[in-house]
Amino acid sequence: MLTRRHIRIKVMQSLFAMKQKESEQLDLELRFLKKSMEQVKHLFGANLQLLLGLKKHASFLKGASKSKEGDLIVLANALGDNQVLRLLEINQQLQLLVEENNLDYWYLDDEYVKIIFTELLDHDFAQEYLKIEQPNFKEDRSFILDVFKQVVAPNEKLHDYIEDKSISWVDDMPVVNTAIVSFLKKLKKSDDDMLALPKLVKDQEDLEFAAELFKKTKLHEKRYLEIIDEKTPNWDRDRIAQLDVLMIQMGICEFQKFPSIPVKVTINEYLELAKEYSTPKSNIFINGILDKISKEFSDNGELNKIGRGLM
């Protein structure tokens, strides 16, 4: 599920892209932001489809091989009979998600499936699983979880491929990987083809938060830049990293336009984003500027916060 921090990342990226393109088409850029959030679920579906790609490859190997022995055939038999993969295969929501959005990349780009399939034999967890004559559902689920966590998720070639498909997916991978592990852990033998896929965006409120933060930061951009200039009189704006400026603008926007978000939460969120996305000392710079602005807003009555503990 997308956290508010991840939503802030997507808004920041959209504002940055808009700045780079020198675009003033707010509605168009807002549609791109919404699409970026929707595509998180597409990555979720594509990764589950990759697991099913292993099952399809197993069927191909069994059909193509005249021998019934050998590690690859033993693994192919095990994957073909895996109860968790069977559940995914019949899941109607997954089928619809994949079909409507053309997410079965692994049909044409099956070399990634083959790489992962072959790599499985090098892992101890796979060798232990193959020793079980008739795995129960729990053992099948544990195996698929290990396949995803130890082989699929860390695969660098797969990361590069996914990045080529959608640049926004690079930042989405940790969130989606966590969601997939959580989803797989909750699967039960009694589940059927109507099992619902998890919501990657919690509710309409999160979608509205993303849209409002994007629009209000952009619409009040000039005023927020003036505020930043006032607090950095000894700095030429060109010397301040563009992402730092954007994060400070977004922070100011939250101070004034989002009454229910505590000041400390806003500042801490942008400090964490700065650590991940900007220069080594950006978090110290952003902390100082946002702290100074929040105190001035509080003194002047411009800090729009409703409720105890939000100041």
Image: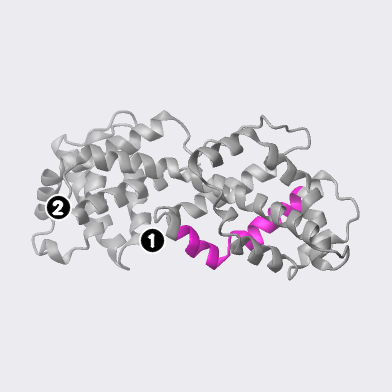
Could you tell me how far apart the alpha carbons at marks 1 and 2 are, in whole angstroms? 22 Å
Numbered range of the magenta stretch:
141-163
Choose mark 1 or mark 2, whichever is in front.
1
Point 61% across, 53% down: residue:
50
Residue ID at (18%, 48%): 23
Is residue 261 visible from the viewing direction of this image?
no
**Residue 162 drawn in magenta:** yes
Residue that extends furthest to the bottom in the rendered view of this protein: 122
| In the foreground, 137 or 264 | 137
Near mark 1 (Cα within 10 A), the count class, few <14, some 14-19 or many ≥20, is: few
Residue 39 rendering spot, x and y as whole percentages: 44, 44
Q: Amino acid at mark 2?
A: Ile
Identify the element where label 1 is drawn: helix
Taking 137 as reference, is 275 left or right?
left
- In the picture of the structure, the residue carrying the numbered disc 2 is 228
Above or below, 250 relative to 60:
above
Q: Eyeballing the image, is 204 above or below 102? A: above
Q: Residues within 10 Å of mark 2 (few under 14, many from 20)?
A: many
Do callouts 1 and 2 mark residues in contact (Cβ within 8 Å)?
no
Quadrant for the C terminus in the image: top left
Residue 208, picture quadrant: top left
